[in-house]
Image: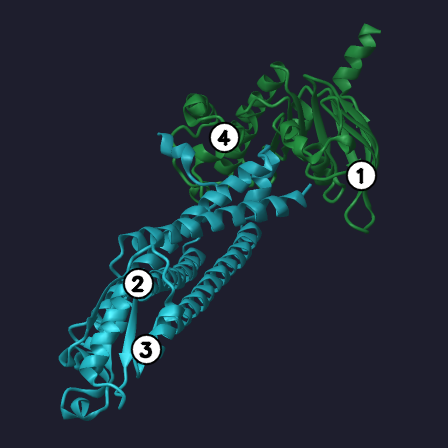
Chain colours: A green, B cyan
Amino acid sequence: MVRFENVGMRYGLGPEVLRDISFTLEKGTFHLLTGPSGAGKSSLLKLMYLAERPSRGSISMFGRDIAGTPREELPALRRRIGVVFQDFRLLDHLSVFENVSLPRRVTGEQGGTYRAEVEELLQWVGLGNRLNAKPATLSGGEKQRVAIARAVVAKPELLLADEPTGNVDPEIGARIIRLFIELNRLGTCVLIATHDQRILERLPATSIFRLAEGQLTVTKPRDLLMQEARRA
Amino acid sequence: MNRRSSAGLMPSDSASGATLHTIVAVMSFLACLALGGVLTLSRLATQWTDGLSGSATVQLMASPQISPEDQVKEALSLVTQWPGVLSARALSRAEANALLAPWLGEGNLIDELPAPQLIEVSLKPGQPIELDGLARKLADTVPGAQLDDHGRWNAELAGFAASSAAIGWSMLLLIGLATLAIIVFATQAGLRTHREIVEVVHMIGARDVFIAKEFQNHFLWLGIRGGAIGLVIALLTLLGSSLLWDSRATPVAGQYLPQITGSPLLYLWLLMVPAGLGLIAMMTARLTVLRVLGRMQ
């Protein structure tokens, strides 16, 4: 589904912020991305949600080589990716409902076709009574849940979340993680960038990506390794 | 409920929106006046030239070789028999005085002037007439007779109308270009101001044309609203000017200066100004957004 091969990235003429990144993400897998601040997590996510192009190496998304994909075909690929931005990036002049509906709306769907689904999703993330609220009136946790609802509303094949539980209380955090797990069970490939030790320790991840100084190491969780050892 | 999903993706900036509305309204006002002027002058020029080309005037200057009565009789006889002439009649002294009264005033002065006797000649519409031949024949056979076929007036009026129309159309072109430039700047500023929104919508998978549509709709309505405001102000101005130039108040000016109001066709043309501005604004915004987005990843 996603394949990075010897990918390097730099901004302008600056130093490389990512070096020799290689990994693959398969359909229905669950991944965690961690590393200190400034290690390049955001840059890696930008490459994955097609906001930037690599300086070198090759990236393949959904079987398409990104370097050879014309610009006008990128929106179709982006629609298969859900993104939870660390700073939420909600549109302040739109209501909660309108923000969450956005991925459906940009595909040309009419409001009537997704209204019930959006309202149900907002009920699920505990914002059923805030449909018409503007982001400015929401708490940090509520904004984060709106951002998550927006990322998953179009049932993406790949979900990228940057610190999705950073601003929510443990109960809501657990609910969000359950939502991710549920999506993953339905076939969505999930990658969560986090510093949250609870997530790193408890989530049944397929692999853990650690970024340090622009370089990536991929490890498998201890219990997964043990399972594989037992099978062997 | 449907209103929820139909809100514009671009916020309506009340401050810059008001400024842009004002600028577009001013452009519309100027365009309406220019268009009104062009159409009125074209109409008047046609009226004037039609009126003049359907007639001619014979001037009979006093001559010692012939009495005034015989001069009129001979001239009338010659003119009425000339092929293409519908009718001819000698103007009375009172009628001639009435023509001069706006310049010379009413009084004894007119009676003392050696004003020529005038013969008004009506020509058959649509029928060719040899006016040069008539002029030569008159000059040869009736002493002191001179034919004025209004050709000089016609040429001057046609020249005046053409140059005025050219100025008016140039103004309209410049107003269109200025509106275009303003919308380009406003769209680019809008893209810069709402860069965050554009990026998010872009990342979510919106195609360029979707984003462009949001901007073009915004500017289409801005153009139409601003244009309509300008049109209303222009109509009030035209109405005011027509009242000021009312022929009852100033008989001379009322008779010769153009009255801009009055033609229903003119108002229909003026209605095209807001629509045209809306269209210019819409297309400009669309092309600008597509060009700017084309440079993004």
Under circle 3, the secondary element is helix
Q: Are marks 1 and 3 on the same chain?
A: no
The alpha-carbon separation of the residues under discs 3 and 4 comes to: 90 Å
Disc 1 residue type (three-letter): Ala
Q: Is residue B250 visible?
A: no
Q: Are marks 2 and 1 on the same chain?
A: no
Rate crowding at label 4 as few (under 14), some (14 to 19) or many (20 or more) other CA atoms within 10 Å.
Answer: some
Q: Considering the image in quadrants, where does the N terminus of chain B appear?
A: top left
Residue B109 image label = none
The alpha-carbon separation of the residues under discs 4 and 2 comes to: 67 Å
Q: Chain of mark 1?
A: A
Spot occupied by residue B116 in the image (x, y as percentages of width and height): 25, 84
Q: Chain of mark 3?
A: B
Residue tagged by mark 4?
A: A105
Which circle's residue, 2 or 3, is located before the other in the chain?
2
Residue tagged by mark 2?
A: B54
Q: Is residue B128 visible?
A: yes
